[in-house]
Image (cartoon, rainbow, N blue to C red):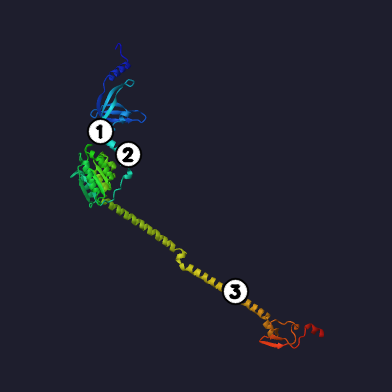
Amino acid sequence: MDNPAPVRVIANTMSGYVNRLGPIWVEGQIAQLSRRSSSGTVFLTLRDPVAEVSVQVTVARSTFDAMATPVTEGARVVVFARFQYYVPRGTLSLTAREIRPIGVGELLARIEQRRQLLAAEGLFDAVRKRPLPFLPRRVGLVVGRNSAAERDVVDNATRRWPGVDFRREYAAVQGHDAARQVIEALGVLDGDDTVDVIIVARGGGAIEDLLPFSDEGLLRAVSACRTPVVSAIGHESDQPLLDLVADLRASTPTDAAKRVIPDVRDETAKLASLRERSHYVVRAFVDREQHGLVNARSRPVLSAPRRVLDQLSHSVDETLARGRRCLDQRLRRSSDEIGHRLARVQTLSPLATLQRGYAVIQTPDGSVVTVASAVSAGDVVEARLAVGRLTATVTTSTDHAALEESR
């Protein structure tokens, strides 16, 4: 107590002790992962899965990105790191030089890497999802033989629609040969034209047990199927990659039966509701149209339709009579005008003059003799009378002027 050491001295002393420690391998579970785009360092919180103990780990971004299998939160890893004591804050952390996933963490990391690869190829795109038929003629089922998943799917589907038909193809649902057997079963069902939808079902299990349903070959086989595929693997929390590539993901085998097979009771109720709604709509339509007919019939044009025809017929008769009167008047006026003109023509006609006793004297060449000096004694002339002609010989020709002088 007589000569205490300052905190900075103690902190620097501890930093010296820590820095002299060599690198060690540390195993733990990643509880938190912070990866900022603007920083060249990745920060991890490494937790002991048994005891509530954690330690901060920093790793260079280039080292973290160079991992063959990327890790995520929850993965178990081993870290090769050195201790580092940060004097200003008095905190102890680890600076990692290498990170390796182990156990389940390694499996999860591989699955995540595969997921990213297939997602980049577009195998999980929504546009590739095919719609399920409303009521499939036959349901293809890929399950383990005598499994609980088979009973769940078949029993629930039969209760919902008693006439549902299944074609079962049994395959191993865990183990190293499971993926190959499931692919073969899918090929058989996809080649059957009577199968409208395929369900791949399995009960829950550990991550290692569900690993075949994240197999790349199986995922590509499902993507190539012509028939819609439903994934019903494990429980709600289980999510193998088959759920992403399938056309529909069911949380459990029981949920798959509900999603694929309609409930006959629900459909019957829907039909009754639709029938009632249709009856109401048709009745409303008929009532509306009947009301419109009543209104239309109450109009004068429909209540007495012959009235309009009678009016038009009377108008036609009047127009016809007026036309006849006009025509008769025109004909009478034209007839009188023709009679007047005929009388004038007859009055001015030379024949009328001849009928009063006059005659037209013509020479043999047809010239009309108008003066006496035009002919001489002995000339032959022709006299045209009102009726007939006379031929005469001129005995004497006296001019009018000479006649006047003699008078």
In the picture, residue 202 is in which quadrant?
top left
Depicted 319 relative to depicted 147: above or below? below
Viewer-nearest residue: 178 or 266: 178
In the rendered image of this protein, does residue 264 appear above or below residue 321?
above
Kindly indicate the quadrant of the structure image that contains residue 233: top left
The amino acid type, in three-letter code, at marker 1 is Glu
Mark 3 highlights which residue? 330
The tag earlier along the polypeptide, 1 or 3, is 1
In terms of depth relative to the viewer, which is nearer, 399 or 258?
399
Instruction: Determine crowd level at label 3: few under 14, some 14-19, many 20+ residues with C-alpha closer than 10 A.
Output: few
**Residue at the disc numbered 1:** 106
Farthest top residue in view: 2
Judged from the image, the secondary structure of the residue bearing numbered disc 3 is helix
Q: Which residue is mark 2?
A: 120
Observer-side mark, 1 or 3, equals 1
Q: Residue at x 61, y 75 (%)?
A: 334
Q: Residue at x 25, y 35 (%)?
A: 107
Identify which amino acid the numbered label 3 is placed on.
Arg
Look at label 2 and name its amino acid: Ala
- Give percent across and percent down for residue 68: 28, 32
